[in-house]
Image: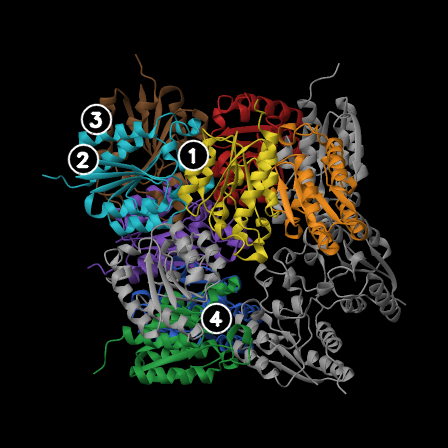
Chain colours: A purple, B brown, C cyan, E green, F yellow, G orange, H blue, L red
Amino acid sequence: MIIDVLNGPNLNMLGTRQPEVYGSTTLQDIEALCADKAKLLGFELRFAQTNHEGALVELIHNAKDTAAGIVLNAGAYTHTSVAIHDALASVALPCIEVHLSNIHAREPFRHKSFVTPVAAGLICGLGAQGYAFALEALAEMLPPTE
Amino acid sequence: MIIDVLNGPNLNMLGTRQPEVYGSTTLQDIEALCADKAKLLGFELRFAQTNHEGALVELIHNAKDTAAGIVLNAGAYTHTSVAIHDALASVALPCIEVHLSNIHAREPFRHKSFVTPVAAGLICGLGAQGYAFALEALAEMLPPTE
Amino acid sequence: MIIDVLNGPNLNMLGTRQPEVYGSTTLQDIEALCADKAKLLGFELRFAQTNHEGALVELIHNAKDTAAGIVLNAGAYTHTSVAIHDALASVALPCIEVHLSNIHAREPFRHKSFVTPVAAGLICGLGAQGYAFALEALAEMLPPTE
Amino acid sequence: MIIDVLNGPNLNMLGTRQPEVYGSTTLQDIEALCADKAKLLGFELRFAQTNHEGALVELIHNAKDTAAGIVLNAGAYTHTSVAIHDALASVALPCIEVHLSNIHAREPFRHKSFVTPVAAGLICGLGAQGYAFALEALAEMLPPTE
Amino acid sequence: MIIDVLNGPNLNMLGTRQPEVYGSTTLQDIEALCADKAKLLGFELRFAQTNHEGALVELIHNAKDTAAGIVLNAGAYTHTSVAIHDALASVALPCIEVHLSNIHAREPFRHKSFVTPVAAGLICGLGAQGYAFALEALAEMLPPTE
Amino acid sequence: MIIDVLNGPNLNMLGTRQPEVYGSTTLQDIEALCADKAKLLGFELRFAQTNHEGALVELIHNAKDTAAGIVLNAGAYTHTSVAIHDALASVALPCIEVHLSNIHAREPFRHKSFVTPVAAGLICGLGAQGYAFALEALAEMLPPTE
Amino acid sequence: MIIDVLNGPNLNMLGTRQPEVYGSTTLQDIEALCADKAKLLGFELRFAQTNHEGALVELIHNAKDTAAGIVLNAGAYTHTSVAIHDALASVALPCIEVHLSNIHAREPFRHKSFVTPVAAGLICGLGAQGYAFALEALAEMLPPTE
Amino acid sequence: MIIDVLNGPNLNMLGTRQPEVYGSTTLQDIEALCADKAKLLGFELRFAQTNHEGALVELIHNAKDTAAGIVLNAGAYTHTSVAIHDALASVALPCIEVHLSNIHAREPFRHKSFVTPVAAGLICGLGAQGYAFALEALAEMLPPTE
Amino acid sequence: MIIDVLNGPNLNMLGTRQPEVYGSTTLQDIEALCADKAKLLGFELRFAQTNHEGALVELIHNAKDTAAGIVLNAGAYTHTSVAIHDALASVALPCIEVHLSNIHAREPFRHKSFVTPVAAGLICGLGAQGYAFALEALAEMLPPTE
Amino acid sequence: MIIDVLNGPNLNMLGTRQPEVYGSTTLQDIEALCADKAKLLGFELRFAQTNHEGALVELIHNAKDTAAGIVLNAGAYTHTSVAIHDALASVALPCIEVHLSNIHAREPFRHKSFVTPVAAGLICGLGAQGYAFALEALAEMLPPTE
Amino acid sequence: MIIDVLNGPNLNMLGTRQPEVYGSTTLQDIEALCADKAKLLGFELRFAQTNHEGALVELIHNAKDTAAGIVLNAGAYTHTSVAIHDALASVALPCIEVHLSNIHAREPFRHKSFVTPVAAGLICGLGAQGYAFALEALAEMLPPTE
Amino acid sequence: MIIDVLNGPNLNMLGTRQPEVYGSTTLQDIEALCADKAKLLGFELRFAQTNHEGALVELIHNAKDTAAGIVLNAGAYTHTSVAIHDALASVALPCIEVHLSNIHAREPFRHKSFVTPVAAGLICGLGAQGYAFALEALAEMLPPTE
C-alpha cells in the first residue's frame, strides 16, 4: 500500500528559510521521519517536492491508480491553486493537508485554502511531526490490506 | 487556416473525473469531435492539453503568427491566471472561451474568469458540444480564405 | 415538440439600439434564423418578446405543459429578477440562457445572473448565432420524439 | 371590515412547483383556509394573486381607502422591489408579511426583504397556516368595529 | 406530549424594559397565555427563562429525550450563539423561533440569526401572540398522540 | 418639439403619501406646473405616470422617434431597474433625472441609481420645482427649432 | 437678504481645466450669471472661491449670522470633508449643493458626498445653469423680506 | 506534569449528535483514549467538558499554575469567544487546538477561530485521534521532567 | 447613592496577565482606588467581577432599582455581547464604559463595542485611572442627593 | 512644563452649534476649565483652535521641542487626516485624544479615528470634563519636574 | 526649463521623524541632491514644502504655465486628497510620484493613492534617491529645449 | 558581485504586445540597457525570463548563494503568486520591484502585489528606464566590494 507525501514550492529551502517561522529541520529530515513512520505502519512511502503547480497537479493524477492516500503540503499553492483543488477532487483518495506553521494564525492571505474543502483532515503548526500524524491518520482511515 | 484548441489543467482526467459534473466523455472524444467539425469548416485543427500555466501561456504565444483563432478551455487557470489574460491580450486573435460545466452556476470562486474580458464569446454548460459551437463561431468571425 | 424562445426587455429595439454593442441584426432576423434552425431540428418554434417582468414569468409558466425546452434571453431582467429565477425553477424544463453580448465582460452589474443557476447552459457574446447554438443544444438534450 | 390577502409572482404555480420546498397545497387551498378564518374573525376577505410588480403596487394602493389591513406574500418581489416598499409606506395600513418557506434559512438573496421594514410582523416557514396566523394577528391589532 | 418554551437573556425584564419596543406584557403573562394554549392543544407545557447561554444550551439538550418540540425565543443569543445553533442541530426536534419585535426591521446586528437555519419556522413582531401561534404550528407538525 | 415627462411607481399617490417626505403637492399640480413651463419654453408636453416597469420601458422607447428630450422621475425603479437603464441607452435622447426628495440623503438603498449613468443631469430634493428646472435645462441643451 | 455662493478647490481653474468634462465657462462667467439671477430675485450676492478646506469651513461659519442661504459647490472636498459637513450642520441655513458635472456618473470616489446629508437639494450635471437654479430654489424656500 | 484537555459546548452530546458529521464516538471514549495516551507519555490527564463560556474561561485560568499544557476543543465558542482568546493569552501555556470535524471545510461561520491566534498548532477533521496527536505534540514541545 | 462598578471576563487575572498590555495593577488595586474615589464623591461602591456573560447581564439587571449609575468594563464581552447591550438598554441608568487599554488601537475585532451605543461616555487606554474618571463623570451627571 | 491643548475645525462654534449634540458650553468655557486644572497640576497651558488641517499639523510640530504632552480634539479631522496621524507619530509626545460627544455611538464615518493609533488614551462623550481628565492623565504619565 | 519638486505635510520634519522608517536625511539634503541632479540635466529647480492641502493645490496650479514637469511627494495627502488629484488633472503636466518609504508595503490606508491615476510613474521605497530618479525620468519624457 | 534581473510571463512578447501600454522596446533592448548600466556600476549581470511560476521561484532560490541582489519584474505573477512572495522571503536578498507600466493606475486586479511586501523598493510606469534605476538603487544599498 503506497502513500504519496507531496510537497509544494519553497519546501526544498527548508532549514535555511526563515527559521523563526519554519524551524531548522530540512526536507530530508522530514522524508526520513516519514520513512520511519511509514515502515511502522506498513506503508510504502513515495516522497516528492516540486516548485511547479502543474507538476503538483500531475503528481496527484499519478496517485489515482497507484496510491492509497495522499499527505499534501501544497505550500504557497494552498492559497491560490484551483487546479490542485480540482486534481484532488478528480482522484478521490483520502488526503490529509499538512502545514509546518499555523497558517490560520499568520497573514490573512494564508487563511484561505483551496485544499481544505477536498481534504479529510488538516494539521498545522506542529512542524515535521504533523507529517507523522498525517500518516497515522491515513492508517486509521484505510482498510487493512492482507 | 489553423485553429488552436487549447485545454488547461485536469482536462486529461476527463471521463474518469467527477462524471456527475463533467460526464463520461474523454478528451480524446472531444478531440475527435473537434477534428470532424474543423474538417467541415475547412480549418486545420491543432489540439493540445497541458497542466502547466506557463505552458498554456506559451501555447497562446505560439498561436500569434501561426493560427487564425483560439478555442480555450483554461480549466482551473480560468479563475486565477492573470498571465493567461495577458498572453491572450498580447496575441490579438479571436478567442472563444469554453467550459464543459456551467461555471457561473457552481462555487463562487468559479464565477470569476480572467479569460472572459479578452474573449469574444463564452459557452458553458454544454459539454463537448460547446467546443463544436466555438469552432462554428470562429468560422463566422474569420474572413474566408481563398 | 415545441421550443419557446423568449426574449426580455429592450430586445424589440434590436438593430437600432447601440449597434456598437449589439450589432445591426433585428429581432425579426433572429426569429427567422431560429425558425430555420428549428425546422432543421424538427422543433416547432414559439418566439416571443416582452418588456414586462410579469409577462416573462407567465410565458415561462405557460411553457410548463406545452413546451419541451426554453431558450431564454431575459435581457436586463437577467440581472435583477428573482421572479424569473423562481418561474424557471417551477417549470422544470431544460433551459439554455443566451445573451447577444458577452455580459461577463461588461459592467459589473451585468455579471450577476439570476437565470444561470437554473439553466443547463449559457452562451454569450456570439450574437444571433448564440440562439441557433442554443436550439442545437436543446436538440441534444431532449429525447427523440417518434 | 375588509382584509386584503395579496400574493406575488409564481404563487399561482403552488402545488405543482418544487413540492419539496413549498408542499402540495394549492393557492386555492390557501384561499379557502383564509376564507374560513376570515369568516370566523368577522372579516371580509379580498384574495388576489398577480405576477406583475406594478399590479401588486396598485393592489396595495387600492387597499388604502377600502381595507383595514393587508396580509402580503410578495413572493420573489419581496427581495427586489423598492416599489412595493414605497407603496406599503404610502398606504399606512397594518401589514403582516407571510412566506410559506423559511426565507431566512434559504439562499442569501432571499434574506433581504424590502417588505419587512414597513410590516408590523413576519411569519415564515409555517406554510399555509402562516396566512391564518396573519389574519388572527390583524384581528388583534385592529379596533373592533361596531 | 411535552413542549419546551425556552426564553433567553433579558426576557425576565419584560414589561419594564423598553416598553416602546417590547410592550408592557410580562414574561408571566406570556407563560399564562402559553399555558392556556397548550392545554387547548393537549400539550404539557415546560416554560423556562435563563440569562446564561450555557444554560440555554442545556435546556435544549434536556429536551432531546423528554419533549416533542421547542418554542425558542433566544433573545440576544439569537444573533451571536453558534452553541445554541449546534445544540438545536443535535436534538433534532421541531423548533419554532419566536421574537416579540420584528428583528429584521431593527438594527442590522439583529438581522443575523443562528437559530433560523435549524428552525422549522419563524414568527416575529407579533408580541406575545407569536408564542401562541408557535404552539399551534407545533401541534400541526407533530403526529397526534393516542 | 415634444418633451416627455415620465413618472414611475407610486407617484400617482403624491399628496396623500408620506407628506413629511414628499409634501402635499399632487401629480396633477406637477403636471400643471410643467405645462406652464413648457408653454413658456415653446415645448409640447407629454406627461405620463405608470406603476409598471415594462410600461416605463415602452414609454421611453416611444420617445425615440417622437420626442426631443425626456424628464424622468423613475421613482422606486430608479434604484432597481437595469431595463430602464438599457431603454434610455437605446433611445439616445437628452434626459434629466428628477427626484422630489434628496435620494442621496435617505436610506442607502436609494443612493444607487441606474438612471444616473445615462442621464445628462440630476436634480433632487427641490420638490415640484425640480421638474421646471429640468425642462429649462433641456431647453438649454436642445437646438432651437425654427 | 444675502446669499453666499461658495466654491471649493480647483474651480479657479475653470475654463482651462479638462474642458471635455467641465466646458469652457470660467468662474467669472458663473459669477456674472449668478449676479444677474440674484438681482432678478432680489438677493445680494456674495461669491467666493478657495482651495483651502479650512477657509471653506470659515466662509460657512461667516454665513451663520449674515446670510439667508448658501449655494455650495465644494468641489473635491465634497467627497472627503467631514469638517465642511459639520460646519454646514452648525449654521443651520438652507443650502443647495451644486456640481457642474454629474458626479454620480463619474468615478466611484465621487459618488460619496459629505454635503448631501446636510443639504436641502442637489443639482448636478447642468453646468453653470445649475447655480442659477440653486438661487431660484433658495428664493422659493426663503420667506419674503419686506 | 498535568495536561488539561478541555471541551466546550455540546461535546457532551457526542455520539448521539449528527453522527454523519461527528461519528459515533462518545466523549467518554475520547477521555479513555486520552487517558491511555497520557499514561504512555507520562502525563497526568485532567479532562473536562462544559457548556458555559465563563466556565471554560475559568478552567483555562485554573491551568495557569497547575498544568503544563492545554488541549482545547472549544466547540462552538471557538468561533465567537474573545473571552477564551484572552484567557489563553493570559495563561501563556502551550495549547493545541483540536476539532473533530474539518471546521475550515464547513459553513463559513466556522472558518473564523478566536483560538487559533493563541494556539501553537491546529488539528481538525481527524476525529478522536486528533486528541491523541495533540497530546503527542505537547509531549514534543514540553521540556522533559526529571 | 450606590454605584455599580462591574468587570467582565479575565479581569480577575489582572496584574499577572500580559503586563506589557495591561500593566501590573491588580483588580484589588482598582477596587481600592475606586473605593477611595467613591468615598470622596459620596457614593456607596458595589464592585464585582465575573467571567460569565449571563452573570454580567444579571448584575446589570440588579442595578436597575438599587443603583444610581454603572461603571462597566465588560472586557472581551464588550465586542461580542448583544445580551449586555440589551441589559443596559433595559435598565436606563447612566453608564460609563471603561477599558484599561486603548481598544480602538488594538486588533480590529476589539474596535466593535456593543456597550458604546448604550453608554454615556467612553474612557480607554488610561489604565486604572480610567475608573476614577468614570466615577467623577457619574458624579457630574447625577443629581445631588440631600 | 507646557501642555498643548489643541482643537480642530468647528470647535470655535461651540455653544451655538447643535446644542442637542454638543451642549451649551463654549470653547472659552473649556479653556477656562483647562486653565484651572492646569494650574492645579503645575502645568503651563497652551490652548489653541484652528479650522485648518495644515495649521493643526504645524501646532503639533511646534509641540515637539517645547511641550511635554498634548491633549487633542481634532474634531472632524479625526476621521479623515492621515497628515495629523503622521504629525503625532513624528513628535513622539504622550497624547490624549478627547471628543465632547461619544463618536463611536454616532454615524459610522465617525467611528474611524486616525488619531487613536498614535494616542495613549481616548476619552469621549464626557463633554468639557473630558479635557480635565485628559490633563490629569498626562500628569500621571509625565515624570515630575523639580 | 523649470521643474517643480513639491513636498507635502510633515516632510519638513524629515531626519527627526521616525528614522527607522524614513532615515536621517533631511529635506535640505534632498533639496541639495535635487539641485545637483537638476543642474546636471539642465533643469531649473523649484523646490517647495507645505503642510497645507490647499497650498499644495495652488503650487500645482502655479506650475501650469511656468513649469515643464512635476515631481510630487504629497505625503499623507497622497492617500486622502481628491483636490490634489483634480489639480494634477487640470494642469496636464508630466508628473512623477515619489515616496521615501514603500507605501504599498505599509499600513493598508497608505496603499490608496489619489496621485497615481494622474501620474506618469511611481517610485517608492528608495529614499532620497527616488527624487533623483524622478528628475531623470522627467528628462527622458520631456522634449529637449534648444 | 552578481545581480539577477528576473522577468516573468509574457515579457518575451515585449515590443509586439500592446505597444500603447508597453511601448516598442523589446526585452533584448532592456537586457542591453541593463548590461550597460551594470558594467558602469561594477556588477556582473545575470538576465533571465520565464513564463513558468515554478521556474521563477527556482531562479530566486538560485540567487540565494550566488547573487548580491535581485531586480524583479514578475509580470502577471506579481498579482497572484504567494510562491514567489515566499521564495523572496526565503533568500533574504535586497530586491527592487520593477514594472514597465504604472500598475497602480491600471485595472484593480493589478493593484495587489505579492512582491511589494518583501521588496525594498518599487518603480513603475517608467518603462525600461526603471530597470536602470533599480540597478542604481541596488548599488546604493550594497556594501562596496574590494
Q: Closer to the camera: disc 3 or disc 1?
A: 1
The dot on residue F61 is 1
In the image as oriented, which residue stretches furthest toward the left? C146
Is residue L129 visible in the rendered structure shown here?
yes
Within 10 angstroms of label 4, few (less than 14), some, or many (20 or more) residues?
many
Q: Nearer the viewer, mark 3 or mark 4?
A: 4
Q: How busy is the neighbourhood of tag 3: few (under 14 within 10 Å), some, or many (20 plus)?
A: some
- Amino acid of disc 3: Asp
Helix, strand or loop status at disc 2: loop
Of circles 3 and 2, the one toward us is 2
Q: Residue at x 64, y 49 (%)?
A: G116
Where does residue H66 sit, x and y in percent of width and height? 53, 78
Indicate left or right for F46 with A56 as reference. Answer: right
Q: Which residue is mark 2?
A: C43
Separation of residues labelled 3 and 2 (CA atoms)? 25 Å
Please name whichever residue, H49 or C28, is drawn nearer the observer in this view of the structure.
C28
Q: Secondary structure at mark 1?
A: helix
